[in-house]
Image: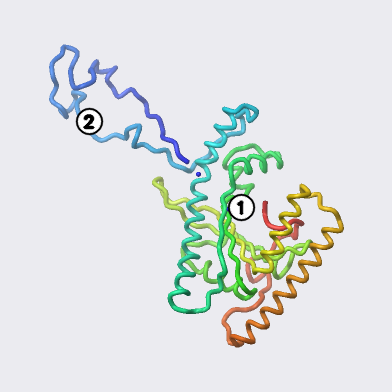
Amino acid sequence: MTETTTRSLDADDGRALSGAQPGGVDPAGAARPQGEPGTGGVRPHRETEASAVRPLTGPIDLSQIDLSENEGRREVRQGLARFLMPYKFAIDEVMTKLKILQEEFTQTGEYNPIEHVSSRLKDPDSIVEKMRRRGIPLETELVQETITDIAGVRVVCGFVSDVYRVFEMLTAHSDVTVHQVKDYIAKPKPNGYRSLHLLLKVPVFLSSGPVQTIVEVQLRTIAMDFWASLEHRIYYKYDREVPSELLGGLSDAAEQASRLDSTMEWLHIAIRGSGRDTLVRRSADSLGGNSDGAAGGGSG
């Protein structure tokens, strides 16, 4: 908010077929010239067991492993840890882009719309539980399709207009593809949750080649972040069975946070002037679509 294995190669390098013995000596005991063609000496370059690292990508079927056994749980964690590596690297890519923006604003003395940034990578146990809860086999291809918030980055801004400004700057990168946008600021969820959710595809350059990897980016104001953090704690405490009076209180708090954002935005414009190049609010359609307003705060 991860770990690697090497591929075993076939140990048979032709000695059994040729009768050659290790160490450059033939069956009769005569020394062979090293590297002489056809003698089994130094051969043209082949991948060795140590150098042949299996690519991090590719489907892994973990659905048949017995999770009731310690060995099974360990095997699943190892498989998922390998599967998660590109997601970890994708987080690094997005975080680097954001840190560069922050450093640029610091160096130039310009107004910095980013208050702070955090990230998290879903852990293997959380993935197993989510797939089990949804009744979907634990195959990595299905995990990719089912869980879109494996890699998560959260950007907290001072003002609503800053949220959309950071959205514009981040998605202007030529290597970033906008996969999906859910604007819960323009159209809050029924429980009052507000944030701008992006699914971005970024290339991760592995030894086996580039892999397009999805990162969920949540952009929100300080007020929205405070409300979402409180809501998450309450849902966790009550195991998502929150009493109705608390739900009503959360809804009221969401409205108060929204009014606070509006007031602070007005003050921000009054201080800095109205000649700004970023709209305070946009329609969800202009950002590429919205979601169904499912209850609950952030993704999980």
- Image x and y of residue 124, in percent: 59, 41
The numbered mark, 1 or 2, whose residue comes first in the sequence reads: 2
- Image x and y of residue 22, in percent: 23, 20
Dot 2 alpha-carbon crowd within 10 angstroms: few under 14, some 14 to 19, many 20 or more: few
Query: Which residue is at the far top?
Result: 28
Camera-side residue of 153 and 118 = 118
Q: Would you place residue 32 above or below residue 133 in this image?
A: above
Q: Residue at x 75, y 75 (%)?
A: 259
Kindly indicate the quadrant of the structure image that contains residue 72: top right
Q: Would you place residue 20 above or below residue 291 in this image?
A: above
Q: Residue at x 47, y 58 (%)?
A: 93
The residue that mark 1 highlights is 149
Q: Residue at x 35, y 34 (%)?
A: 50
* Disc assigned to residue 43: 2
- Image x and y of residue 169, in percent: 52, 71
Give the alpha-carbon distance from disc 1 to disc 2, as whole Å. Answer: 47 Å
Identify residue type, mark 2. Arg
Identify residue type, mark 1. Asp
Q: Residue at x 52, y 36 (%)?
A: 78
Camera-side residue of 108 and 137 = 108
